[in-house]
Image (cartoon, helix red, strand yellow):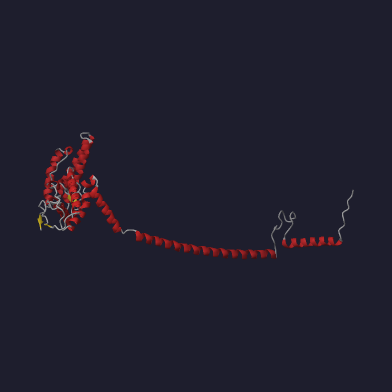
Amino acid sequence: MTRILPRLPWFGFATLVVWAATTSNVQAQYGYYAPGNYPNGIYGRGYGYMTGYGNYLQGVASVQDAYGNLGIQSEQARIMREKSEQEKLVTRRKTFDEMKYERDNTPPIVEEMEKTAALKLRRMLTSPLRGEITNGSALNTILPYLNQLAHTNYHGGPPVPLNQEMLKQINVSSGVAATGAGLLKDGGKVNWPFALRGSMQEELDPLLEKAVTLASQNKMTPKLYKQITAQVSAINEDLRKQFHREDIDGAAFLEGKHFIESLEGSVALLKSPNASKYFNGTYAALGVTVDELVMNMTSQGIKFAPAQPGNEAAYFSVYSSFQQYANATQSVNESSFRLRTPPTPMQGAKNSKPF
């Protein structure tokens, strides 16, 4: 059965013709083609783009848009930069305030040093290590404090006597020579440990006594000093060989080694410019009582040097007397007054006279 389509009216046909003509003009002017209708290859002359005045206007619009965006971005960057500078100022202000706070609330360095010194003094007066007593550091820490007490309490606190035999074993130093006269303080007579005794020790003994005599008169010679140092080195080498041959045990070796190290320090003092003061009795721990000893050592600028082997007990004795004086001086009767007369180098101690 054949179906007959209705005939379009004349004005409908005319409409289709106008639409087709318009589409062709638009395609020719702007280069736009409907999908699937590409005259120049797959995509034609620029599918989706305009040509002619439309393309020109689009480019101008794009440039103006980009310029506007650039201005906006520049302003935004400037604003962010200004905010960054403001934050820097805030940070600087906070840093300044923090530094000022810390400066205002941090104790001065002098106060910190005084506090540290006070804590150290307290420990030395109450619970020092044994080594701190025998090497003189505890006594040297207490010495200025006792000197202050002695002068504050009318130049004389409670009379705490000192054992003079123990005091003779105390080794002192002017600060330049850390070891002091040490083993040679008794006229150069040295009490050698068992492991070091022998022919080399017997050869060295008269040289040491001669050297001390000359040094006390400030007449020490380089030749004699060289002989002594060479002999001490030979004894040290002999001690090492004895230990390697197992002629002596480890304890004897360590005892001898420590003795030689002390002897070397004392020998080095023989060539010192002020060696005579060590060997003629000028630099010595003198005083019948603690306050006399303290003022004597302070006035001469000398301090306690490390104890020599076998003299450790003397240091504990003096330390005990220092403790007793420090405790008793706190409650001293200030109505009493005693005048101290300065000692002479050859006196064993000062004289105490009532006033």
Above or below, 104 relative to 242: below
Q: How many marks?
A: 0
Residue 65, x across and y down, in percent: 62, 64
Residue 218, x across and y down, in percent: 12, 52
The C terminus appears in which quarter of the rendering? bottom left
Q: Is residue 123 visible?
A: yes
Residue under the image location 86 percent in, 61 percent down:
10
View extreme (top): residue: 246
Viewer-proximal residue among 254 and 272: 254
**Left or right of 317 on screen, residue 50:** right
View extreme (right): residue: 1
Residue under the image location 18 percent in, 40 percent down:
235
Residue under the image location 40 percent in, 62 percent down:
97
Residue 129, x across and y down, in percent: 24, 46
Viewer-proximal residue among 186 and 222: 186
**Left or right of 2 on screen, residue 114:** left
Viewer-proximal residue among 254 and 341: 341
Viewer-proximal residue among 259 and 224: 259
Residue 270, x across and y down, in percent: 16, 49
Which image quadrant is residue 191 in? top left
Q: Is residue 273 visible?
A: no
Above or below, 57 relative to 204: below
